[in-house]
Amino acid sequence: SQQGEEDPQALSIQEGENATMNCSYKTSINNLQWYRQNSGRGLVHLILIRSNEREKHSGRLRVTLDTSKKSSSLLITASRAADTASYFCATPDGSGNTGKLIFGQGTTLQVKP
Amino acid sequence: NAGVTQTPKFQVLKTGQSMTLQCAQDMNHEYMSWYRQDPGMGLRLIHYSVGAGITDQGEVPNGYNVSRSTTEDFPLRLLSAAPSQTSVYFCASSYGQGEEKLFFGSGTQLSVL
């Protein structure tokens, strides 16, 4: 069962523009994570935001979390061609520290030079 | 540090054949898991392990077996390959103990004819 659903499924922007991706989830969580996947590669962890945080920054990345709406957004500012990738949100499944994450279907971002 | 190492990178099987996908991590991670990635489906959890000797099923476990005899290794066995198992398989690991960030291998692309 998908916990997180990303929106939009695909996004195409020009270099220098900002890219915003959204994630909605269904059940209560204690954290939400974002991952990036370059074509043909494994996923790479970008950022983790905990349920008691509303916003978190890492370099050009800004993540927000609204637990009342069960949604999160990932903003990439001043995008670069190297940001072209698929982006996934992920939330823990079940209780306890099992390491189980449930992933959304992802947003495919294309940044045109 | 090699991180999470998956072998082989590519594999073609005939229906009914069996094989083992290897996964090893050198980070002393407690938690390891296997995902499959299919177009339009995101990543789906197959099996996971919270430590040596402990495994459990994920969302799509049918047709797959796992074992965890050591902390480092978590092989995934396809018992009798079917075309529906054509997919890209990713192994991932995490520290656990409240650190849920996953480290991914580079994937195994499997085709079952």
Image: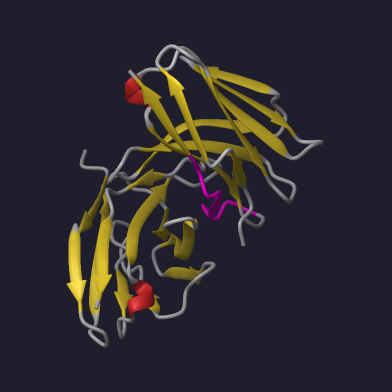
- For the image, the number of numbered tags is 0
Q: Tell me the quadrant of the picture where the C terminus of chain B can be found.
A: bottom left
Work out which quarter of the rendered image holds the N terminus of chain B and state it: top left
Q: Report the magenta stretch's main SS.
A: loop
Determine whether B32 is above or below B100 in the image. below
Determine the residue positioned at 31% across, 78% down.
Answer: B78
Foreground pick, B42 / B100: B42
Q: Percent x, y for residue A81?
A: 33, 21
- Left or right: B71, with A58 as reference point: left
Q: Residue furthest right?
A: A68
Q: Position of B29 compared to B26: left or right?
A: right
**Image x and y of residue B26, in percent:** 26, 47
Q: Locate residue B82, reporting x and y percent.
A: 33, 81
Residue at position x 18%, y 71% in the image? B12
The question of residue A86 being in magenta is answered with: no
Residue at image coords 36%, 73%: B85
Q: Establish if A71 lies above or below B107.
A: above
Give the vertical position of A70 relative to B106 (above or below).
Answer: above
Res B66 seen here: no
Residue at image position (56%, 49%) is A104
Residue B53: image x %, image y %?
40, 70
Magenta part of the chain: A96-107
Residue B81 visible in the current orientation: yes
